[in-house]
Image (cartoon, rainbow, N blue to C red):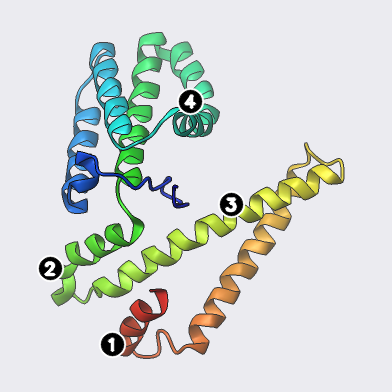
Amino acid sequence: MSTVSPLGAYLPGRSALHRLRPGAKLLGLFAFATTVVALRGTVTTALLLGIAVLLALFAGLRGRDFWRVTRGFALIAIPLFAFQAWQNGWERGFEVVGDLFALILAASAVTASTAVDDMLDTVAWALQPLRPLGVDPERVAFAFSLVIRAIPSILEVAQETRAAARARGLDHSLRARVVPLVLRSVAHAQLTGEAMTARGIGDDDTEGAGNHDGDER
């Protein structure tokens, strides 16, 4: 059973990717992204795309997961490919779209094989050297956790807003979808801020950071 995550669906497993430390996976993802940006050519793009697909399979992604990722990316990929093909030829269009899809699949492989809490712990650990410069790693990780936990709520609100617009026969009305989504998202952010204020989070740097961990867990 997968755990809902804004970064993708975490799929518990025992693959080599699951056993790899989150920091190593993030470094590997960075190296992969650097390679994608540095290299050019349709053959290279096809090769990197194949590697990304294999990584996604190792992470446990299957047909429905690939479809979810592909469906979301198609909204951007189709017009982007059409524009690049028109301006620079289909080869360039394939490179641009293929490189982006390879990065998305590689990132999906990382998130599918890494629990969100492990990822946040890694972020806090990686920021420790910046503590002398005034950076609070726990606070930054807490900010990440707030964002991560807020995104599913916003997606749920978006679905409810779309369903409400459809029920009123306003499927094609951008205003009927966007305005309620923005208002409810702002209201959600205000409620979160009020809840944090009520708990005293942010009043004191040290105690606040400590409370965050306890409250979130």
Marks 3, 2: nearer the viewer: 3
Q: Which residue is mark 4?
A: 77
The Cα–Cα distance between marks 2 and 4, rounded to whole angstroms, is 39 Å
Is label 4 in a helix, a strand or a loop?
helix
Q: Residues within 10 Å of mark 3 (few under 14, many from 20)?
A: some
Residue 89 seen in this snapshot: no
Q: Position of residue 6 (x, y in %)?
A: 46, 51
For badge 4, the amino acid type reads Ala
For badge 3, the amino acid type reads Leu
Sequence-earlier tag: 1 or 4: 4
The Cα–Cα distance between marks 3 and 4, rounded to whole angstroms, is 21 Å
Whether pointer 3 and pointer 2 mark residues with C-beta atoms closer than 8 Å, the reply is no
Sequence-earlier tag: 1 or 3: 3
The Cα–Cα distance between marks 1 and 3, rounded to whole angstroms, is 33 Å
Sequence-earlier tag: 2 or 4: 4
Sequence-earlier tag: 3 or 2: 2
Q: Is residue 201 above or below residue 96?
A: below
Q: Which labelled disc corresponds to residue 129?
A: 2
Is label 3 in a helix, a strand or a loop?
helix
The Cα–Cα distance between marks 3 and 2, rounded to whole angstroms, is 35 Å
Q: Which labelled disc corresponds to residue 155?
A: 3
